[in-house]
Image (tube, grey):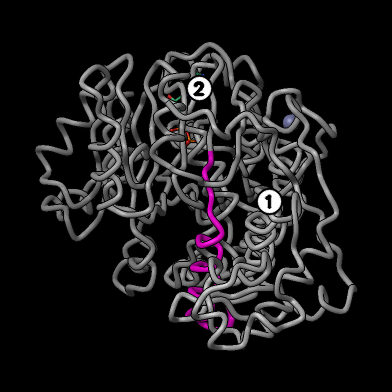
Amino acid sequence: VVFGPAPDEATLLERLHSVFGFRAFRGVQQQVLDRVLSGQSTLAVMPTGAGKSLTYQLPATMVDGTCVVISPLIALMHDQLRSAEANGIRAATLTSADENRAETVARLRAGELDLLYVAPERASQSHFRELLGQCRIALFAIDEAHCVSEWGHDFRPDYRLLRPLMELFPGVPRLALTATADAHTRSDILAQLGIPEEGMIVAGFDRPNIRYVIGAREGLTQQLRRLLAANPGPGIIYAPTRAATERLAEALSDGKREVRAYHAGLPPEVRAANQSAFVASEDMVMCATVAFGMGIDKPDVRFVAHAGLPKSIEAYYQETGRAGRDGDPASAHLFWGADDFARARMRVQEVDEARQQGERARLSALGALVETAGCRRAILLRHFGESPPETCGNCDNCLEPPKSVDATVTAQKYLSAVARTRQMYGAGYVESILTGQSSERANSQGHDTLSVFGIVEGEEAALLKPVQRALLVRGALLPTEHGGLMLGPEARTYLKGELSLDLVLPPKRERGRGR
Ligand code: ADP
Ligand code: ZN
């Protein structure tokens, strides 16, 4: 393939209109197209919904030869195929699920395909390499390119096979696409896929119409009921497990507003019915696992709530990004618990050592997001490499700045109480020792004679729960297998006074306002 200078703007716009019916490019689309159409390899980092597919679909209709698209999920591939074909693009998928493989291969050989969607594992198959060698390949588009990086949240070893394949086609440019990449993952993608540094184009990530609200989980069902009362319009509540989606759907159904559950374990016809009811509805609430929302075109989702900690900042951004695609005001609510962090920390220990560092970094980034007294949006945008203003005016902390108190001394008392009671007891018992509540258990263990017995008095007692939460988030406390608390690797720095603990106290708005 010979790429010349990219076509001029008028030509591109004309093409955009004739193929897709759109009148203008969005965000960085044109920048990406300019590079791709002049044959330069590129990494485009664009948020979900920013229109990544167009950046390879449009070139595919303009250059001589086929654009090979690598995509990790067969289901997504088939969605993409349908929408490409609806725009009159000559496209096909080549997967084990397709029965028309022979026909696809024939069309490819005959140069009758603009787009060929394949899964990454195909790259390692020698007959696939040979097949591509017999065809005219114009472009390699690598969708969900963060899958190539162990730093990414979704590493797929098969993505590592792409580079050797693409190297057999030295003149063919590569276009890597991702919505989700921190600085580390991005440079890894460039390195792993052989894309020059100047080839990276990052779109703006801000979603100014989304209001971010983050708080601790304290009586989740009540919190969600209040949320639903305050937020009419369609909404999604993400729950961590299938069972939890069903439990919440039932608990939140009040006979007026429709609340349904959605997860991969439901019969396909129920899932399909719930999904299309949601898409058509103006006030339905869907309690779902995070798979829900991918590939669903519903621009007027008014809120997204997380009933538990998301997997990463990227996942949080992507999931909350399903709200307010129409540009009208929308909100994102996260209810987190210290146990989310505790569980995630345990899981980190189970993954390969090579990935642990990345997993820890992901957790501490989440910790910083949920615990900040500052602007949530600023934290999100900085995470994606932008330099946002200090305040946004449209997140909980900007709208109602929380108080923060120095709780270092309380934290030290807490950690000593855990140590003195031999790291065996749960939060309730530790609190009872600190606040000096005699009990048979305390007396029989002699805990009522410890120096920490009753050293927390008055108002300070109200800090104990948030302190415990903060210590768990920071890895200074760890859960034991039996539901107790033990000291974590960070405990010493607090006990020795090397680190202080500033505690963010949310405004009273949430408390004591039961219905
Ligand atoms: P992504 O893959 O980045 O999440 P998509 O490629 O699925 O996003 O595009 C999201 C939506 O935006 C699609 O409905 C697409 O048709 C639409 N879209 C993309 N580019 C434009 C544009 N330039 N003008 C109008 N709509 C666009
Ligand atoms: Zn803000």
Q: Farthest residue to the right: give it.
A: 498
- Along the horizontal axis of the image, is 142 left or right of 281? right
The residue that disc 2 covers is 324
Q: Which image quarter is the C terminus in?
A: top left
The residue that disc 1 covers is 462
Q: Is residue 1 visible?
A: no
Q: Amino acid at mark 2?
A: Gly
- Along the horizontal axis of the image, is 110 left or right of 358? left
410 in the magenta segment: no
| Foreground residue among 262 and 472 | 472
Please tell me which residue is depicted at 43% across the width and 13% down the height of the picture: 21
| Position in image of residue 43 (x %, y %) | 63, 49
| Foreground residue among 264 and 344 | 344
Q: Farthest residue to the top: give it.
A: 23
Q: Amino acid at mark 1?
A: Ala
For label 2, the crowd category at 10 Å Cα-Cα, with few meaning under 14, some 14 to 19 and many 20 or more, is many
